[in-house]
Image (spheres, grey):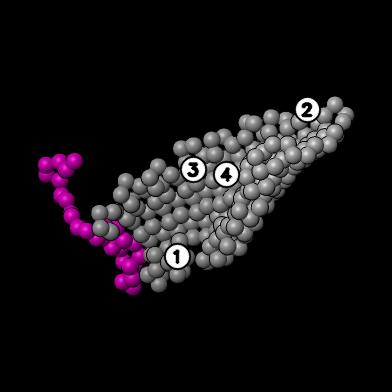
Amino acid sequence: MIRRGERVIEANRFILRDERRRVRAEIAMQGDNPSFSLLDEEERRRCEIGLRGYDPYFVILDDEEEPQIELATREGVQFLRFRRKKERSFELFLYNDGIRLAFRDGNDKHRLVISLEKDNPLLTLLDESGEPRARLVYSEGGVSLSLLDKQNRGGLEAEVIDEIPSLSFFSSEGDVRMELSVEEGEPSIALFGAGEDAKVLIEVADESGKMKIYDEEEKAKFEID
């Protein structure tokens, strides 16, 4: 609040010059957003602090005025980003219900993401196109490892859920086609057709093997004990 008798200077931009008349600092309004910048001897912005709407930010820039280190908040998300000459970078994000650390390659594609979502850790490996190819997840029920094809559908998944280990193979359409599991010490192998129900089931129970083959109506068509 301005008090009576105080001297006030108002403007949309203030600049600080050195002895050679070069701009070295600037306080300005960028639209409705205030900012404070420091400039080098070539009058290039190298550091800036300001507001974007209600969100504060702090940026350190290189000699091409490209952001190298950025600390900011956006819509309730805090993030820290490090980048080197438009090459590799990593980012740290803090959400209301999680944390994410992401690494980018020289083509600005995500290649590795480590996250904690609702207290569940997740590790994701991505290919040169930025598509997920491997994912390791731990949750309260157990742990799972997924290996994916380029379409992010086919592949295999190994998991241990509620102390039951299993290995599943998926088609390029994302349908499970074979599943191996061990439940209460008894192994089983299930082969699937186009639907979700097993067409061939091989299992061992009470030290004896059993194989069943099902028809289109999911009725046992052939059975060997």
Type of amino acid at the residue the image marks with label 4: Ser
Task: Give the number of the mark in front: 3 or 1.
Answer: 3
Whether residue 75 sits left or right of residue 196 in the image: it is left
Type of amino acid at the residue the image marks with label 3: Leu
Nearer-the-camera pick, 84 or 10: 84
- At numbered mark 4, what does the secondary structure look like: helix, strand or loop? strand
Q: Position of residue 40 (x, y in %)?
A: 41, 67
- At numbered mark 2, what does the secondary structure look like: helix, strand or loop? loop
Q: Residues within 10 Å of mark 1 (few under 14, many from 20)?
A: some
Specify the farthest residue to the right. Answer: 207
Q: Residues within 10 Å of mark 3 (few under 14, many from 20)?
A: some
Query: In this view of the protein, can residue 133 be seen by the observer?
Result: no
Type of amino acid at the residue the image marks with label 1: Glu
The label on residue 115 is: 4
**Quarter of the image with the N terminus in it:** top left
Type of amino acid at the residue the image marks with label 2: Glu
* Residues in magenta, as a range: 1-29
- Mark 3 and mark 1: Cα distance apart in space: 23 Å
Query: In this view of the protein, can residue 18 be seen by the observer?
Result: yes
- Mark 4 and mark 1: Cα distance apart in space: 27 Å
- At numbered mark 1, what does the secondary structure look like: helix, strand or loop? loop
The label on residue 94 is: 3
